[in-house]
Amino acid sequence: MRNIWVICRKELRSYFVSPVAYVLFVMFALIFGWFFWNMLGAFVFYSMASQMRGEMTPMNVNEQILRQLLGNMNVVGLFFIPVITMRLFAEEKRNGTIELLATSPIQDFEVILGKWLAAVALYAGMLLLTGLNLAFVFKYGNPDWKPMAVGYLGLLLQASALLAIGTFISSLTKNQIIAGAASFGVCLLVFVLGWASGYETSTWAQVLSYMSVTSHMESFTKGVLDSKDAVYYVTVIFLGLFLTARSLESLRWRS
């Protein structure tokens, strides 16, 4: 565990000694804030309009703001995840330090877990920053925090799964641009696999729907913690990190 923590701290430090982390935090906060304040404005507008018409239509903060907000950030994360993962191993290969890692007493799984955990921690920090906006909802409204917590857990699990995929792709090349573009393409493909089930009911369409990360996010945005969805994300994480380990192992075969 000590080696994993050392690698994790090293990776986190490398994010913050360059502009990468700061740009990601600022852009993510701005995009989240723009979505949040527009949804909040629409909520207040329709609530006041409903009262002026004498209608007593119940307005639910969790359903009409938070659930839609988490669904939108589910998509926005696709653009940030490749930026986070593209440098993990590609930069090591470009700088020639991957050989030092391969021949060091640190085991491959410790290197992989350390780098992946650093990426997850960075994304978790971006999600934590969005809490500044949600503080206004709790101050002036009365939302249920439990569905919100489940929704955030779903965002983190989904991001962790996609970060594992991006980590694997980064281990395949020394070019960060290629790693980022390939990670975005694969993550987007995994994201839209479920579209086939919208017009097709055969087995292959249902299988693709199950493989899609979006179909497993729906229950989280509703505030429902379903074990099968959590197991799916954990399985994708394991598969991504396992393939990364095989990729690093192949470096020794070629050397």
Image (cartoon, grey):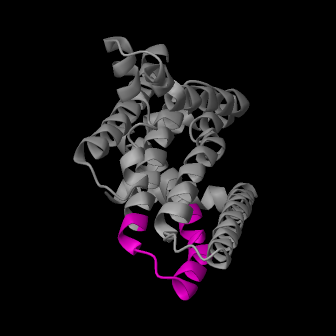
Predominant SS along the magenta part: helix
Q: Is residue 123 left or right of residue 109?
A: right
Identify the residue at horizontal 44%, vertical 28% (top origin). 248
Give the total number of marks visible in the rendering: 0
Whether residue 7 appears in this view of the structure is no
As rendered, which of 102 and 194 lies closer to the eye? 194
- Percent of width and height locating residue 119: 52, 51
Q: Quadrant of residue 182?
A: top right
| Residue at image point 64% right, 56% down | 15
Q: Residue furthest left?
A: 227
Left or right placement of residue 54 versus residue 231 in this view: right
Q: Nearer the viewer, residue 193 or 1?
A: 193
Residue at the image point whose x is 50% and y is 58% from the top: 67
In this rendering, position of residue 140 left or right of residue 79: left
For residue 190, above or below residue 63: above
Q: Is residue 212 above or below residue 25?
A: above
Q: Residue furthest front?
A: 54
Q: Does residue 76 show up magenta in the picture?
A: no
Closest to the observer: 223 or 24?
223
Which residue is pictured at 60% across the width and 70% down the height? 129
In magenta segment, residue 142: yes
Query: Picture coordinates of residue 65 (x, y %)?
Result: 56, 64
Task: Look at the picture and state if 166 lies above or below 29.
Answer: above
Report the span colored magenta: 125-148
Residue 12 place in picture, x, y as percent: 56, 59
Quadrant in the picture for the N terminus: bottom left
Q: Is residue 82 visible to the viewer in this orientation of the structure? A: yes
Q: Quadrant of residue 106?
A: top left
Q: Position of residue 233 (x, y in %)?
A: 35, 41
